[in-house]
Amino acid sequence: MPRRSTVLWLVAALAAAFTAVLPVAHAQAPAARSFDVLQLNLCNSGDEACSAPGQAVDAAIDTIHQRQPAVVTLNEVCASDITRMTAETGYGWEFTPVGDANTGDPAKCHDGRGDAGVAILTHPDLGAPGEPVERQFAAQDGSGVQRVLLCVPYSQVSACTSHLSQEDGQVAAEQCRELTSIATALGTQAVLGGDLNLVVGGTPDVQSCVPDGWYRKDDGSVQHVFAMDAFRFERAETLPIGGTEHPGLLVQTTR
């Protein structure tokens, strides 16, 4: 009959051998999270040539409810539009007005709807913003509208928007480079959306202001979303937005 010590040794040896053939467990990487950007030009400052006043705001609110983007970048909106949109969606917001070059004051929307400008709405999950960057571009086109940029930093992500010069492509290109420079300098993962009034293959070409480490998607025309390579591109689609001549541009990413 084997000694007790021998039996214990055999049991230990078998256990060690069995353990050796088991696969080594590895910690799973955290699942990628969706991060979608919706760019909208609501054309809602009062220019009847491109909008049916007020209808685009209704359509934008419906789209935000349906698609739940992380960031919404907005052009040609009124301060009162943003008040309503945030109240009805629960999104956070930042707004900055474009300038009136003739008076030096913020440009106004028609019908007493407040200042006209650009805005960023953010899903509540992004938390509280840091100090926004909002300023007029160094290059302006002499049209009477002083174009502005708006960037909002969060703890892990930054978002920027602008509506660039419609009158002068070279000025729009300079503004685009200033916008992307600010976005890159914020020091976090960043996205931007806007009506840049530049197109692929144009003179100048919008691609010329895409920084290294970024990529760009468009609506087939002048609206674009730029994202740092940290945001893995999944797909882009255009969405019908009633009341404006511009579609919505939804770019879906993960990070």
Image: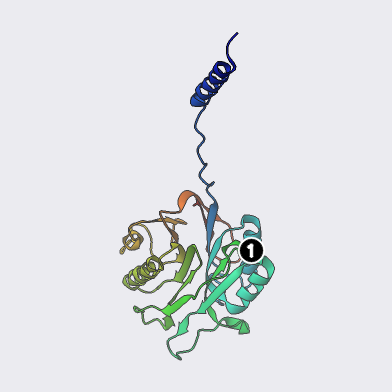
Q: Position of residue 5 (x, y in %)?
A: 56, 19
Q: Is residue 122 visible?
A: yes
Within 10 Å of disc 1 (Cα), the crowding (few <14, some 14-19, many 20+) is some
Amino acid type at mark 1: Ala
Describe residue 181's horizontal placement relative to residue 61 as left or right. Answer: left
Q: Considering only vertical position in the picture, is 216 above or below 84?
A: above
Q: Quadrant of residue 87?
A: bottom right
Give the farthest residue toward the right.
88
The residue drawn where x is 51% and y is 21% is 13
Name the foreground residue: 255 vs 66: 255
Q: Is residue 249 visible?
A: no
Name the foreground residue: 121 vs 49: 121
Q: Considering only vertical position in the picture, is 214 above or below 159?
A: above
Q: Position of residue 69 (x, y in %)?
A: 58, 58
Q: Secondary structure at mark 1?
A: helix
Q: Position of residue 203 (x, y in %)?
A: 30, 63
Give the residue pinned by disc 1. 59
Task: Assign the N terminus to one quadrant of the image.
Answer: top right
Give the farthest residue toward the top.
1
Q: Considering only vertical position in the picture, is 3 above or below 52?
A: above
Q: Position of residue 206 (x, y in %)?
A: 35, 61
